[in-house]
Image: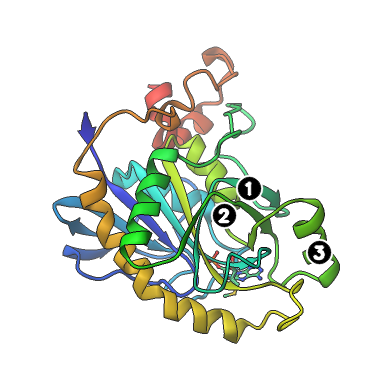
Amino acid sequence: MSARMIGVIGGSGLYEVEGLENAAWTHVETPWGAPSDEILTGQLDGVPIAFLPRHGRGHPLDPGSVPYRANIAALKMLGVTDVFSVSAVGSFREAMAPGDFVVVDQFIDRTKGRAPSFFGPGCVAHVSLAHPTCPRLSDAAEAGASAAGATVHRGGTYLAMEGPQFSTLAESRMYRESWGADVIGMTNMPEARLAREAELCYASVAMVTDYDSWHPDPGEVEVTEILATAAANADKARAMVRALPELLGAQRAACPHGCDHALEHAILTVPSARDAQAVERLRTVAGRVLD
Ligand SMILES: CSC[C@H]1O[C@H](OP(=O)(O)O)[C@H](O)[C@@H]1O
Ligand SMILES: Nc1ncnc2[nH]cnc12
């Protein structure tokens, strides 16, 4: 067993959490720059917790400008072991209605030009991403969201689009009918990839805010509708976060799904061929396998 620290990345409509003991906003600098904002640290029920608003307080960052590598690296550097990502999404399924929560388990990545990896020239690694979310954390997310009174759907495929514009009607129909996506958003990729590379357990809680553009009613996505639904959901999201420490506990057994050992056999570059600067940067997220 080892000490647990819960990380929460808050999406559109969730810019802070309440009730933390010893709450403090902390600046963290990483080899990949500064994260989206300062990180709110403290304890809930005796469990250390770190909260990061993905778009920054006041929402200055669009989905393509979010510093995904710095965000994940900063959480790792603070000692976070388990990451809950909270996001606003459009729904491709009638049954996943605005206001519902979906505990996502798969992704389709349609983002463009975002740095997808901590690794690269000088230190090459290939981690498995067949199962990009952690079932143990997803169990806790599902239980926490249910306890918060949300209607929760367990499992779903999140299509990550580049944005910032919403999808065309043709894209929306294709993602829904041909690609089998269940929800759509703009931020869970490369976030989930990077969490895996940093050996962090990662669960994604998607809060449905709209039916994207495939649905005849209303037939268009309006950001005002999204923000109104996200604001109405924010209390449930905060209640879910408050439930997590008790559900998970302060001590953590190794992940039965191997998230915390994802890099075990992933680094291909032999020590003698590694770039010293790349390795120095990587120590913050992959020190376990580099030291
Ligand atoms: C506010 S509308 C679009 C915006 O909302 C979602 O943000 P997040 O995933 O951080 O909750 C979506 O991905 C877009 O960034
Ligand atoms: N319909 C939608 N498309 C992309 N991102 C979203 N976030 C919330 N609703 C969305």
Is the CB of the residue bearing disc 2 within 8 angstroms of ligand 1?
A: yes
Q: Quadrant of residue 128?
A: top right
Q: Earlier in the sequence, mark 1 or mark 2?
A: 1
Q: Position of residue 214 (x, y in %)?
A: 77, 71
Q: Position of residue 274 (x, y in %)?
A: 56, 21
Q: Amino acid at mark 3?
A: Arg
Residue 29 in sight: no
* SS for callout 2: helix
For label 1, count other residues whose C-alpha is less than 10 Å away and answer few (under 14), some (14-19) or many (20+): many
Residue 26 to residue 279: above or below: below
> In the rendered image, which quarter contains the N terminus?
top left
Residue 262 in sight: yes
Q: Is residue 180 left or right of residue 155?
A: right
Q: Amino acid at mark 2?
A: Asn
Q: Residue at x 50, y 72 (%)?
A: 12
Q: In the image, which disc is placed on residue 164?
A: none
Closest to the observer: 65 or 30?
65
Residue that carries the numbered disc 1 in the rendered image: 107
Is the CB of the residue bearing disc 1 within 8 angstroms of ligand 1?
A: no
Residue that carries the numbered disc 3 in the rendered image: 173
Q: Earlier in the sequence, mark 1 or mark 3?
A: 1
Give the image quadrant in which the ligand numbered 2 is located.
bottom right
Residue that carries the numbered disc 2 in the rendered image: 188
Residue 237 to residue 2: above or below: below
Alpha carbon separation for disc pair 1 and 3? 17 Å
Q: Is residue 252 left or right of residue 168?
A: left
Residue 167 to residue 50: above or below: below
For label 2, count other residues whose C-alpha is less than 10 Å away and answer few (under 14), some (14-19) or many (20+): many
Closest to the observer: 176 or 184?
176
Q: Position of residue 247 (x, y in %)?
A: 25, 48
